[in-house]
Amino acid sequence: MIYVVIGFLWLSVCLYLILGGADFGAGIVELMTKKKNRKYTEKIMYESIAPVWEANHMWLVIAIVILFVGFPEIYTTMSTYLHIPLVLMLLGIIARGTAFTFRHYDAVKDDWQIIYTQIFYYASLLTPFFLGLIGAATVSQSINPDATTFLDLYIFSWLNWFGVSVGFFVVALCAYLASIFSLRETNDRLELNLMIKKSHQTMIFVVITGILVFATAYFSGIPLVKWVFSKPLGVMAVTFATVALGLILKAMNNKKLLPVRALAGFQMIMILVAATYQHNPDIILLGNGEHLSLLKHIAAPKTITALGWALMLGSLFILPFLFYLMFSFTKASKKLD
Amino acid sequence: MRKLIFMDDFIAARAQMALSLGFHIIFACVGMVMPFLMAFAHWKYLKTGNKIYKGLTKAWSKGVAILFATGAVSGTMLSFELGLLWPGFMKHAGPIFGMPFSLEGTAFFIEAIAIGFFLYGWDKFNKWFHWFCGFLIGLSGLASGILVVAANAWMNSPSGFDYINGKYVNIDPIKAMFNDAWFPQALHMTVAAFCATGFAVAGVHAYLIMRKKNVEFHTKAFRIAAAFALIGAFGAPLSGDVAAKSVAKRQPIKLAAMEAHFETEKGAAFVLGGIPDEEKGDINYAIKIPKVLSFLVSNDFNAEVKGLNDFPRDEWPPVSVVHYSFQIMIFFGVIMICIGSLYLYTFFFKKQWLTKNWFLKTFFFATPFGYIALEAGWTVTEVGRQPWIIYGIMRTADAVTPMPGIQYSFYFFTAIFISLSLIIIFLLRRQIQMVPKLYDPTDEQFNFKNKKS
């Protein structure tokens, strides 16, 4: 049963990265668009996320609940030593969710829209950045429970160049996903070309920040290259992700938009595989040389069994309903009406 | 002076948790009840074809959207705060009391999906499927509420494990979920949510009727909301009785603090008001109704009720806070029962009063009463459990995060909550101002083109 629980944990992190990530990306893409084109990107982005954004963010809640029920030690270690970036990430989640809703539901459209929009933009940057930073901190051995000073315990546990670059990398991924996903929501050639241009730009951004991640890992003495490329699975994942990139470019040229979406989602899965499989099942590598493992640091067996059943039953209700929601509000089904 | 400005970390963590819960609970209750109001109006529209009901459904659904989004983010935040502030607690309690949370995740998820369907699904789906999605928001909201309360109940009535030599063994999360306190607490909370939301919505519409604009629209809204408020107002004392009896059995010290009852005695008096003096172990200026407390907790006028002095001093909760909160809850509860009775009398015997200003004013003044009682009631539950975080097992002070500087986090979150509250009040005001243009089809300013749904 523990593998079911780990599977759901991985699935919810993965779906949060893809769906929630595209959602954050929507704000980033809008922010990166020139003023004169913003009204297009705003509309396209809005249409692609409005009905589903709340559901997308549930994946984070599911992941957190799995952590604190099934892996309490991992949850409390993170929430103790990564307190500050977690609070900042939360700030982003609060500000973004509310600003997005308020922007749409304010019955009067006036200058307040500018404030909501600005908050929406910057909060969309903040959350994925800190998400990346937190992810990086779990593997960079920067968390050290044996440290003695406040700075070492609670600040340098997450603040380092590697973390910052992973933060930027995640921001880039989100923007990339959002621009790719939005291609199918466009109404005409003008909008489509605008978004294809955005996709190209964000793709370059992903590659640059990706290189930055490897460079900072190298300079910080984190054996990232070895982790990713020393086993066949890692090499395969990276190869697949690269091949997918080529296919995406080709499909985009031919205006085949559905495969573009699927490929981008696939790329994300491959990137996550490459990033997580190597030290699996160790999920947190601590600075004092110890590891927290998904197989060892777990809750009592009865809890794991109950949690596994709850997740499986829950997904029976959630998944069909969710896919119907997503399907109902894609452009393609709107055209059928 | 320095002490005044800088709270210590433990107090700051408690204050931040209290503030976050107190904030979230308002939106959680709206999410539990408002969708039912909305679904009821929607049902009326589908049955009668009266466009006013459709406008009302849409107007309320906007309220639900704004408040649900706020509730969703503040709820997400709480799932992190548990670990950020109380890692010592979560490390042991997570696997024991986490079961309702994992089920709540499902309920919350379904709620978020249903809300997507409902808000964006007008004229896109079969009308009854669409209606059902609205209803489902309420249903899953209610389920979420009950599950979260079950988790809280475990802290008051820990079960589903054995605590041996400081270790938590034989863990059974299902038993923990169905602890002794879950039913009384969940029942009382559900009823209170109906009461609070019903009175709040009825009060707002009563005010708008007095303004003599869109009177038919607001009257329909007022009547639906008032009906839901009645369920709450009359259900509260009944469910409260169940809850009080359960507290007396499980946490006699909490009951003693609620009543500022210091000496164990037979035929204990029910204390109303008064100022407790913890040093002397007495209460001044209180109204005492002889033997009633004994009767309330055990249906026997001469039963023995344990007093605070029977317990070690370091296990007392802050008596005054618990006592005052309990009194506030009772006070507003009684007033709401009176208003509810007035409404019933008016509805059946004096229809002409329904439009009278004094009648509407009464409801307008009662707008926050349900929420005041609700917050006071939760203060009783939570402060009354102190100094324990897991009653009788783990002290709150042992659960707090080792990270210093929590007071800054508290200031930071306080600022967030204050600004969010202000924006929400501002937004709801603007929604209400737009009723003639956007929602009331009988208004001459109404223009369908104004509207994007």
Image: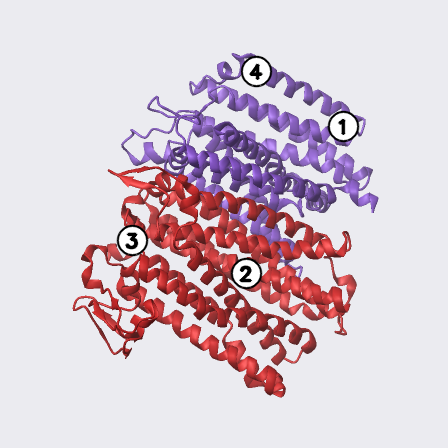
Chain colours: A purple, B red
Q: Residue visible at 82% across and 40% down?
A: A188
The local crowd at label 2, few if under 14, some if 14 to 19, many if 20 or more residues have their Cα within 10 Å, is many
Please tell me if label 2 and label 1 are on a single chain: no
Residue B105 visible? The answer is: yes
The local crowd at label 1, few if under 14, some if 14 to 19, many if 20 or more residues have their Cα within 10 Å, is many
Residue position for label 4: A233
- Residue type at mark 3 is Met
Please tell me if label 2 and label 4 are on a single chain: no
Q: Does label 1 or label 4 sit earlier along the sequence?
A: 4
* Total residue callouts: 4
Residue position for label 1: A252
Residue position for label 2: B30
Residue A119 visible? The answer is: no
Q: Nearer the viewer, mark 1 or mark 4?
A: 4
Residue closer to the observer: A133 or B325: B325
Cα separation between marks 2 and 4: 49 Å
